[in-house]
Image (cartoon, rainbow, N blue to C red):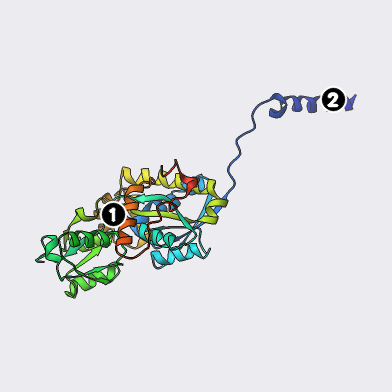
Amino acid sequence: MKRKMLLVPLVLLLALSPVVMGCPAPPQQPEITRIVVADAPTTHHLNLYVAQEKGLFKKHGLEVEIISVESLAAARDAVVTGIADVFWSCPTVAMAAIAGGAPIRTIAQVKIPCTSVLLVPADSPIQNYEDLAGKTLAGITPACEAVIALTTAAREAGVEFKLVKLAGGPAIAALKAGRIDGAILEEPHASIAELAGFRVMFREAAEAIPCRTINARTAFITDNADALRRMIKAVDEANAIINADPIAEDIVEIAHVRTGAPKEAIIHGNPRLLFTIHLDEEGLCKLGDELVKMGHIRECPSAFMFAPEFRGITWD
């Protein structure tokens, strides 16, 4: 008798089982994937930091580690050598590497347009492109898209300027000391210089140029395409948060902590940073053609620059 009583609850339990009743099993969470991002800190990469700090990567089943490096070139090299999987950078940094055979591909845009501008002293005689003739300007590299834009505009005006390679901080110091006639600066350094009284010139020169891309090692894309797509989805959610209020207190705080930039410069410059994931294919290809004209690369890698795994997601 006791044996029969014990069997009844077991039969009822089996009968109520979702499997026996034909109920669908609960959806399985995607497997946690670890992604290492090599990053040269800048407010241009704010969507990376917001996605990390607000738990958006974790929400999409990702464990993202951000390792800081000194430059965009160092970030690229970390990915090429397998130290990291993904890097944010100026498009020219990735484009030149891809054109040279590096095993990386571009998977998404970060922001558009290029917001780097020329800053000159308030009493500078520079008023138009012709006034750049013979002037000495600082820029991070000749292959920077803003430098390319200004070089092209000056060339079309029939003049040339001399470029000295200086990063943002040293460029502002040289500008203050009067050692250069102007400096081509990106945010937040452009806002730092503007708030210090320097005058912005030729903002329109780079407005048609796309700025910053997200790039990954080809082998990692092949093995982890779904995880990377989830990563870009998290970044897009961060974009929506930033674009809705780029000077919200929490957004400014994240930018300040991650980059060390002064909060007043972040507040001044953040509204100019329009974040997106959609690749500006035409603009990037035009930028590649300019690199060819300037002798930086032999041919534009447009035919194989964009990861096919992201076609229909971040590019057409």
Query: Which mark lies nearer to you, 1 or 2?
Result: 1
Q: Which residue is mark 2?
A: 5
Point out the residue furthest to the right here.
Answer: 1
Residue 142 is situated, as x and y percent measured from the top left of the image, at: 29, 66
Foreground residue, 82 or 308?
Answer: 308
Q: Is residue 191 visible?
A: no
Q: In the depicted view, which residue is nearer to us: 298 or 165?
A: 298
**Three-letter amino acid code at disc 2?**
Met
x and y percentages locating residue 291 in the rendered image: 32, 61
Residue type (three-letter) at the residue carrying disc 1: Cys
Q: Residue at x 33, y 48 (%)?
A: 282
* Figure quadrant of residue 199: bottom left
Q: What kind of element bears circle 1?
A: loop
Label 1–label 2 contact, CB within 8 A: no
Position of 292 with respect to 57 (left or right) is left
Label 1 vs label 2: CA separation? 76 Å
For the C terminus, which image quadrant? top left
For marks 1 and 2 on the same chain, the one whose residue lies earlier in the sequence: 2
In front of the other: 90 or 58: 90
- The residue under the point 31% across, 53% down is 286
Residue occupied by mark 1: 114
The image shows a total of numbered marks equal to 2
* CA neighbours of label 2 inside 10 A, class few (<14), some (14 to 19), many (20+): few
- Location of residue 124 (image quadrant): bottom left
- Image coordinates of residue 119 in percent, x first then y, are 19, 63
Q: Quadrant of the N terminus?
A: top right
